[in-house]
Image (cartoon, helix red, strand yellow):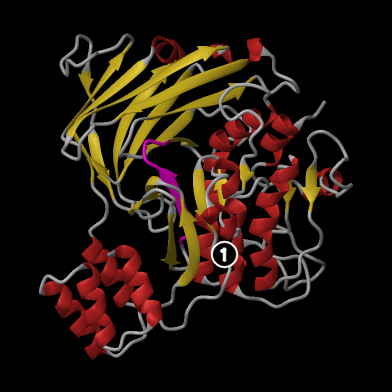
């Protein structure tokens, strides 16, 4: 049987058009156990784009997880570069990412046929999609499983699947959960004054970090409703504190292969874990064909810099993992004084445990599209035997360091189409030390429009 697990890996990135035509025609919800649905020829309009996130997520209500949309719009409508870019972002976080065109020399989806900003946004999210395949494939396997963490859960699902008792989870159908991430796609034109898109969203209780910016959000009991504002090049992809997100480290590798280069994005603020699942690519891999690489994070208990530990170990059919694998850790919005790598065993509380060696730290600026500023730790090439023995990386002086809110406000004000005097006066208020509601009140008194105040309010 070509079940949802294998088929989902094949279609997770780009797919040949002939395969898409053969595999994704809609035959109603009872067509077979793990269908890939084709949602119909999409009209190229903002309304079509706005419809698709809720459609895709709520299909999980009947266990129909794998939807293939015409990303970018199929026919009719009219060209809109911003809309094409936003649709590509949705495709990045969809179960199946399949761009599609109609029989027209003008309606084509190659990124290089769009303007500079749209092209750059499309390219960045197509590359991110490729990198997300290990994470998405693990969730594909979980969705087909009958037991274990995440068994039977849709890789893309409505917020209320995970938070059934929360009213906000039902009220915000445009957002959805992708694996463990809360994704808020932007499905309306940019505001002409701010150059930003805005979406109303709901966050479940807890601490969340936005992957593209590293911005931290907190939500109390009952969750939090807020308006998110983003430029064209970014959407909102919020990961719970303590998340570990495995990504393919080399986009030149085939997406269907178990990666020889693996990046692990580590989200600070709490303990957490994730188990990456890889198999031998057979139609129905049994226990002898599945490797599970567990990843765990121990984070300091208080807000002060402290000792954080990442542990990585492979169990099961380790032979399906490449003989050698390059590992890079990326600590989102995090700083640290030093890092030490140890192969095998558990170093306990001793920073100088036997066999440990220094691992180089490097501060990396935000890429402007998909990943915010972070600390990179390149562990180099490790062997399969090292993964089976277990790898421990210890960080001393680790602390979450989200972006400076003042610089974020500057990034909102600078491109805004407002009188220079009003922007200068708003920035002068920040220089005087105003923040929070006091800053917003002064900005309002200066006549800044609601769209600007809303974007600033999200940051401050």
The image shows residue 125, relative to residue 426, as above or below, that is above
Give the residues in magenta: 234-243
Question: Could you say whether the residue bearing mark 1 is in a helix, strand or loop?
Answer: helix
Where does the C terminus fall, quadrant-wise? bottom left
On the image, which quarter does residue 148 sit in? top right
- Residue 315 location, x and y as percent? 50, 13
Q: Considering depth in this image, is 74 or 208 the residue closer to the camera?
A: 208
- Residue 291 location, x and y as percent? 56, 17
Q: Is residue 321 visible?
A: no
Q: Is residue 337 left or right of residue 348?
A: left
- Residue to which mark 1 is pinned: 86
Rendered residue at 69%/14% (across/down) = 286
Q: Is residue 234 left or right of residue 328?
A: right
Q: Is residue 40 left or right of residue 211?
A: right
Rendered residue at 52%/49% (across/down) = 166
Q: Considering depth in this image, is 265 or 260 the residue closer to the camera?
A: 265
Q: Is residue 229 visible?
A: yes
As for residue 241 lying within the magenta part, the answer is yes
């Amino acid at each position: 049987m070509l079940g949802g697990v294998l088929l989902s890996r094949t279609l997770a990135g780009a797919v040949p058009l002939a395969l898409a035509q053969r595999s994704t025609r809609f035959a109603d919800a009872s067509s077979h156990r793990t269908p890939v649905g084709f949602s119909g020829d999409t009209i190229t309009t903002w309304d079509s784009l706005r419809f698709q996130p809720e459609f895709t997520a709520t299909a999980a209500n009947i266990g129909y997880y794998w939807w293939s949309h015409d990303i970018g719009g199929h026919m009719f409508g009219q060209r809109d570069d911003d809309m094409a870019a936003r649709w590509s972002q949705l495709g990045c976080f969809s179960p199946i990412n399949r761009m599609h065109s109609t029989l027209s020399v003008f309606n084509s989806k190659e990124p290089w046929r769009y303007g500079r900003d749209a092209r750059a946004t499309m390219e960045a999210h197509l590359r991110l999609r490729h990198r997300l395949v290990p994470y998405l494939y693990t969730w594909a396997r979980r969705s087909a499983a009958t037991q274990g963490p995440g068994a039977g859960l849709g890789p893309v699902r409505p917020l209320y699947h995970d938070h059934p008792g929360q009213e906000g989870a039902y009220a915000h159908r445009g957002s959805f959960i992708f694996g463990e991430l809360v994704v808020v796609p932007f499905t309306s034109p940019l505001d002409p004054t701010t150059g930003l898109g805005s979406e109303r969203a709901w966050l479940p209780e807890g601490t969340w970090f936005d992957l593209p910016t590293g911005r931290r959000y907190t939500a109390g009991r009952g969750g939090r409703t807020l308006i998110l504002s983003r430029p064209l090049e970014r959407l909102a992809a919020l990961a719970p504190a303590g998340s570990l997100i495995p990504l393919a480290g080399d986009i030149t590798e085939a997406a269907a292969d178990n990666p020889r280069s693996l990046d692990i994005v580590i989200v600070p603020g709490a303990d957490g874990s994730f188990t990456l699942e890889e198999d031998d690519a057979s139609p129905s891999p049994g226990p002898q064909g599945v490797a599970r690489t567990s990843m765990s994070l121990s984070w300091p208990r208080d807000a002060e810099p402290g000792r954080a530990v990442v542990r990585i170990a492979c169990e099961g059919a380790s032979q399906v993992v490449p003989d050698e694998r390059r590992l890079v850790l990326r600590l989102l919005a995090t700083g640290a004084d030093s890092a030490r790598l140890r192969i095998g065993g558990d170093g306990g509380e001793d920073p100088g445990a036997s066999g440990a060696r220094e691992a180089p730290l490097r501060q990396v600026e935000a890429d402007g599209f998909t990943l915010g500023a972070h600390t990179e730790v390149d562990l180099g090439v490790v062997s399969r035997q090292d993964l089976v023995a277990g790898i421990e990386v210890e960080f001393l002086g680790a602390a979450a360091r989200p972006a400076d809110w003042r610089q974020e406000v500057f990034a909102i004000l600078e491109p805004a189409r407002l009188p220079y005097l009003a922007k200068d006066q708003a920035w002068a208020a920040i220089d005087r030390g105003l923040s929070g509601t006091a800053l917003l009140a002064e900005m309002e008194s200066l006549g800044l429009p609601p769209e600007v105040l809303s974007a600033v309010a999200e940051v401050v």
